[in-house]
Image (spheres, helix red, strand yellow):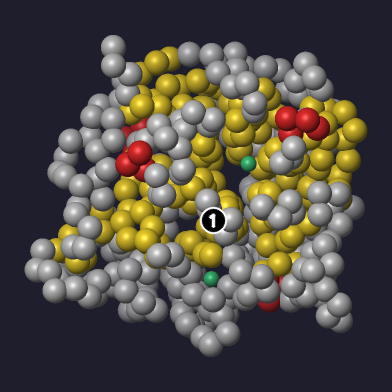
Amino acid sequence: MVHQQYPLLLLGGIVAAGLACSSDSGKAAVGQHSTTGGTAACKPLESREPNAPNQQPAFPGQTRACEEKSNVAFDVTVVARGLEHPWSVEPLPGGDLLVTERPGRMRVISAAGNVGPPLANLPKVEAKGQGGLLDAALSPSFASDRTIYWSFSEPRTGGNATSVGRAVLSEDRKRFDQVKVIFHAMPTYNGDKHFGSRLAFGPDGKLYVTLGERSDKEMRPQAQRLDSDMGKILRLNPDGSAPDDNAFVGQPNARPEIWTLGHRNVQAAAFDPQGQLWEVEHGTNGGDELNRVEKGKNYGWPLVAYGEEYSGVPIPGAVTAKEGYQQPVYYWDPVIAPSGMQFYNGDAFPAWKGSVFIGGMGVTSLVRLSLDNGRVTREEHLLKQRGQRIRDVRQGPQGELYVVTDQSNGELWRIAPKSRE
Ligand SMILES: [Ca+2]
Ligand SMILES: [Ca+2]
């Protein structure tokens, strides 16, 4: 274990609430806030050129929020190194951390940094491209049932797709028992991209599963089709069956597990303290999105989206706004390549209470958004100088944060209040 002091961030002050936001370059109108009578301006955090400079946000503050420096003093401890593309970190009761590695391993790592061997009896994963072992989630009653759920790209006849497994962690935390794959997203497809996937249990006791649309042009339209799980957020009973109060139950040719549609590749999902589900998904070039997830709603992809194709051409037939399609609460142009999210409600960092943290892979940062009334008001990028792709972020029992980094030699970090030594 390596303990490192993190330098105090003392550049600038906290931007006072109520200040208006304006573009500092003067050429990009995107992200300008209307002033509320004040004259002072703040600076959007994003200073790169947008990929789609002619697109307009649907409302002020939907993109390019003002930069906020929270000036919080913290220590970063590298708890473990040598993890191969870790995807998920989950704090376990007692202080251990459960970490997944994309090639198909799950390990228990102690708070002191002892990396346990791979847990035995995990089913095989299709570890290629973006596929492999993805998210893990604890059963809401883990303390009594020791049950763990995980999502993974499952090798199947004719290809692969995302599936959800469930098993009981042995008392000694060395192996899984009662292993069962409880859900198989359909259809199977022979590809290696856009599997999603995050798992989140809601206050309703249901398991929400986020998926991607498999990326390839011929698969994209499935994000809008109710007879396909691709490009959807699903809501499952803990046994993998579909609840009968789901959004499209009873509709002809609609899969009963679907909760929302029109997603591209959802790699972050979390409930806020009020019990509302949010997600973050990878868009095309200039189109990463933060969304509030509401039953039965259509989030647009590939018909309604910000950004452009990675080749630089417009998304065929797409518009940025259309009646009947949900607007993102916030979008990033250029993209940040987000993954993993956590609403912060701990006591360790009072200044961060109410913020949402999002892993930033492309921007090698821990992204923090301030929210007010369901809108993003401020953005901060932390830990950027470490240069690691942040894949997941979770809050621990003492209000500390845990982060894993998406590298071949990936790391597990603990972020805790600066010690007074
Ligand atoms: Ca997780
Ligand atoms: Ca969308």
Within 10 Å of disc 1 (Cα), the crowding (few <14, some 14-19, many 20+) is few
Among all residues in the image, which is located at the extreme bottom? 323
Q: Is residue 85 visible?
A: yes
- Residue plotted at (43% across, 15% down): 2
Q: In the image, 118: left or right of 240? A: left
* Residue placed most toward the observer, 151 or 217: 151
* Residue placed most toward the observer, 372 or 362: 372
Q: Vertical placement of 6 versus 23: above or below?
A: above
Q: Is residue 217 visible?
A: no
Among all residues in the image, which is located at the extreme left? 39
Q: Is mark 1 within 8 Å of ligand 1?
A: no
Q: Position of residue 169 (x, y in %)?
A: 79, 27
- Residue plotted at (37% across, 72% down): 52
Q: In the image, 271: left or right of 71? A: right
Q: Position of residue 399 (x, y in %)?
A: 47, 33
Circle 1: residue type: Gln
| Picture mark count | 1
* Residue placed most toward the observer, 166 or 306: 166
Q: Vertical placement of 259 versus 125: above or below?
A: below
Q: Position of residue 101 (x, y in %)?
A: 65, 33
Secondary structure of the residue carrying tag 1 is loop
Q: Position of residue 104 (x, y in %)?
A: 73, 34
Q: In the image, 321: left or right of 58? A: right
Q: Vertical placement of 107 versus 296: above or below?
A: above
Mark 1 lies on residue: 274
User: Where does the C terminus fall, quadrant-wise?
Assistant: top left
Q: In the image, 279: left or right of 314? A: right
- Residue plotted at (36% across, 27% down): 417
Picture quarter containing residue 116? top right
